[in-house]
Image: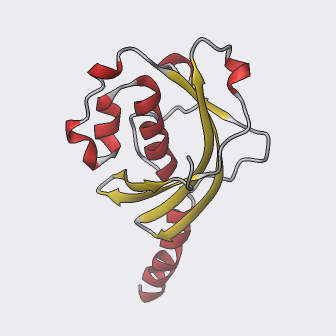
Amino acid sequence: MRSIAAILLALLPAAAAAQLPAVDPAGQYRLIGPAERSDSRCIGRPETPLCAVETLLACFARRDAALCRAVWPQAASLDFTRAGHIRYWWSYRVAAAEQANPDEAVIAIAGRNCGLQMAEPDCITTPAPPTRYRVQRQGNAWRVVEWSSPPGN
């Protein structure tokens, strides 16, 4: 019985690390835009670290405060009504992913936004230096607890 417990404990970090996304190759981009036109299939369901980050990106791209509140505790009073209906595409790639511990990870996203009036393929542009998102598991979901962009972004 003791050996089974030891095996299970040894597998836990590997299972947690398996939730990290692979780094995207240079030149490969993902898109977030309107709900029916986004590459992510988990926006609004922060089941993994990347799903939490993509939900936050979609929140700002779609001006949907409910998405922000789903993954970002500081968004309680966020209101996009003054922003009007300005929405945009977010072109991005996973530049790095690190597991700090089983309940915390850092995902670096290199991306740019462009207006929805642009044709989708034209939105794929050279990204800015990566923004690092620190996410933590809280219960069964992941939350973005902070992010930082390089100076000048």
Q: How is the image coloured?
A: secondary structure
State which quadrant residue 30 falls in. Answer: top right
Total marks placed: 0
Task: Name the one closer to the observer, 51 or 7.
Answer: 51
Residue 58: x, y in percent? 46, 31
Q: Whole-percent x and y of residue 12?
A: 48, 71
Residue at x-position 47% and y-position 52%: 49
Q: Position of residue 29 (x, y in %)?
A: 70, 36
- Residue sticking out furthest to the front: 152
Residue at image location 42% in from the left, 46% down from the top: 47
| In the displayed structure image, the side of residue 56 where residue 116 appears, left or right | right
Q: Nearer the viewer, residue 129 or 141?
A: 129
Q: Quadrant of residue 124?
A: top right
Q: Residue at x 44, y 68 (%)?
A: 102
Using residue 82 as the reference point, say whether residue 30 is left or right of it: right
Rendering coords of residue 14 (x, y %): 56, 69
